[in-house]
Amino acid sequence: MQNNFYWLIYGVVSILIVASIIGWVLSKKIKTENGKTVVLNLNARIKAWWIMISIFSLSFFLGKTATIVLFFMISFFALREFITLTPTKPGDHKALSLAFFVLLPVQYYLISIGWYSLFAIFIPVYGFLLLPSLSAISQDPEQFLERTSKIQWAVMITIYCISHVPALLLLDIPGYKNQGPLLIFFLLTVVQLSDVFQYVFGKLFGKTKLAPAVSPSKTVEGLVGGGLTAIAVGTCMWWITPFTPLQAAIMSSVVVIMGFLGGLVLSAVKRSLGAKDWGTMINGHGGMMDRMDSVCFSAPIFFHLTRYFFTN
Amino acid sequence: MILDKIIITLSRLLVGAAARWIGSSPSKMQRIYFANHTSHLDTIAIWSAMPSEFRKTTRPVAAADYWNKGWLRKHIAISVLNSVLVERITSSKANPLLPLFSALENGDSLIFFPEGTRSDHAVPHTFKSGLFHLAERFPDAELIPVYLENFHRCMPKGSFFPVPLVCTIRFGAKLERIEQENKSDFLERARNAILELS
């Protein structure tokens, strides 16, 4: 696996080098005001990618615990962003404390000890019931259901859904021992490339807006071009997965579609909370949730399909 | 000192505590930063947001009754934050602002909460007269309004520990001095300067 990993990292790094060169050339060539802002943002994004890729590769090389800690931190920042945009009241303080100081660490602890059955129900059952209980104890009935459901949503999306990425390490796939990190690599590459290519195709050929009220940057041309490219890349990566090329193509398609839906839904959530970006943490991209929105939707489905069809 | 690093790291991790210098930028001019007061984190957050070279000479004004409780709190207030402790409940006729006067005479800058106590909302109550007296006595100090966003949600009154939220600290443009302005006009103008940042 180590060898495969080195090749994959080389691959990603060379793509980034090419992207950086293109970004540099564009910054010299483009002179219009509008174009300049786009290129400036593009280069900020590429720079942020360098940082993100470095952090990911480092954690993968350090091993399982580092990977789990990394996703724990990602969940933490995502939850913090989500709650920041959510109007909560002093009566929610207990529920929020539960989310940050109990649900979040326990969910990742369960992954680290490999207790799958509790991992799968901990938040949907225990978290779901305990969160409103704590809010009720604080005795503030005003907009109780709205407040509670927003916190439950935040917890499900930012902790439960994201935790399915490192949970891939738990899957016991015959003939694919200890190769979980490659599966994570496969998932994240397909999701993120799909986002990147949708952005690129959208900027180059985008004409027909897909859902202007929810996500003005999404276009049909971007979705088709970007989605197909990501599926093609995913299919070509079949050799690092337990899948055949055809299965890899199907899995990639599912991942791309779920990722697209995740981007759309979370964009709608973001807008209903009155914001354009989730935060400012990742330069050029917005916040942590702007980068993780598609992962939130694709990871659980990818996890369960793999678990159902490929494990004993 | 390692404790100040820990406090700064913790406050960044928990509340983000990002400084936005909107109308002014950090400077070594003598200043009185005045802010809305909504949580126990406020003092530490503004202090952490200061560039490190000004942190030593920018002293938070803190309530003695709260910060004198317990060894750790006292240690943080005095040795780490270098704060100026004031008595909120004064029995004697002594002016409670005296420690602030001497800090300003020393050339230090102050972080000051003109409401005197924490409020439940981000919108500040009417100010007590302390800020007016400080401003009157030190006409050369720059008065910088500071708006603390989200801190009241992080650690509402009555809670013991903060919930992580992204909180922002906005520094506005210095409050212009107007000759012969009366106390209530001045305090209202100062309060509005904070509200404009919200």
Image (cartoon, coloured by chain):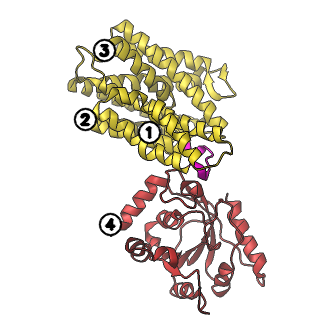
Q: Mark 1 sits on what residue?
A: A75
Badge 3 marks a residue whose secondary structure is loop
Would residue A68 be found to the left or right of residue B108 on screen?
left
- Residue at 71 percent of width and 78 percent of height: B177
Q: Decide if residue A36 is in sight here.
A: no
Do residues under tags 2 and 1 come within 8 Å of each other at their CB atoms?
Answer: no
Q: Is residue B36 above or below residue B31?
A: above
The answer for how far apart the CA atoms under marks 4 and 3 are is 49 Å
Q: Is residue A109 above or below residue B158?
A: above
Instruction: Please say if the residues under marks 4 and 3 sit with CB atoms less than 8 Å apart.
Output: no
Instruction: Tell whether label 1 touches label 4 (CB within 8 Å).
Output: no
Return the residue at label 3: A311
The answer to which image quadrant residue B182 occupies is: bottom right
Report if residue B146 lies within the magenta region.
Answer: no
Look at the image and give the residue range highlighted in magenta: A83-92
Location of residue B37 in the rendering, given as x and y in whole percent from the top left corner:
60, 66
Within-10-Å neighbours for mark 1: few <14, some 14–19, many 20+: many
Q: Are marks 4 and 1 on the same chain?
A: no
Q: Are marks 4 and 3 on the same chain?
A: no
Callout 2 and callout 1 share a chain = yes
- Which disc number belongs to residue B2? 4
Residue drawn at the location 45% of the way across and 27% of the way down = A192
Whole-Å distance between the Cαs marked 1 and 3? 26 Å
* Residue type at tag 3: Thr
Q: Which chain is red?
A: B
* Image x and y of residue B51, in percent: 47, 66
Q: Which chain is yellow?
A: A
> Which mark is drawn over residue B167?
none
Q: Nearer the viewer, residue B54 or B91?
A: B91
Q: Amino acid at mark 4?
A: Ile
